[in-house]
Image: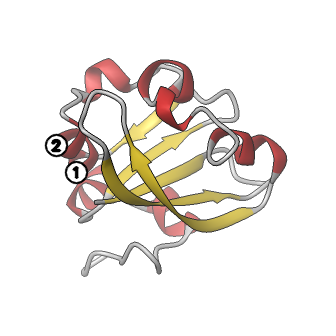
Amino acid sequence: MSTPASFEAVSLNDLESMRDEDRDALPFGVVGFGADTIVQTYNATEARMSGLDPATVMGVPFFDAVAQCMNNFMVAQRFDDEPEIDDIVPYVLTLRMRPTRVRLRLIAQAEMPRRYILIER
């Protein structure tokens, strides 16, 4: 991928096929996890913005241990309720930081192994 994909335009297939370096170059945070919510992808942008070391995030349940402030009906529950989702949600992050307005993009397709949350600050 020569030019970084935009927050609104990047597709689930793009995210799945990107090399780690390409995902790290995106100007927004990318968190990918399986149906069990275990983090499998955590890009450099999100690590820098959140201040969390990827080594402490990878392999950990996202909504239970990393982003408890998203473990609610607005974010986590939607992945359980909606097997097909691609929605942008205005949100306020509150865990480990002063309240920060962001846009979240929730992406999942029933046939894909990973689900994604994109975080634009």
- Residue 45 is situated, as x and y percent measured from the top left of the image, at 22, 51
Query: Is residue 19 at all visible to an observer of this figure?
Result: no
Question: In front here: 50 or 53?
Answer: 50
Quadrant (top left/top right/bottom left/bottom right) for the C terminus:
bottom left
Q: Amino acid at mark 1?
A: Thr
Question: In front here: 61 or 63?
Answer: 63
Where 45 sits versus 22, above or below?
above
Q: Residue at x 67, y 27 (%)?
A: 36
Q: Residue at x 71, y 46 (%)?
A: 79
* Dot 1 and dot 2 residues touching (CB under 8 Å): yes
Query: Is residue 40 at all visible to an observer of this figure?
Result: yes
- Residue 11 is situated, as x and y percent measured from the top left of the image, at 54, 71
Give the residue pinned by disc 1: 45
Give the residue pinned by disc 2: 48
Instruction: State the SS at label 1.
Output: helix
Q: Residue at x 25, y 80 (%)?
A: 2
Where 74 sits versus 35, above or below?
below
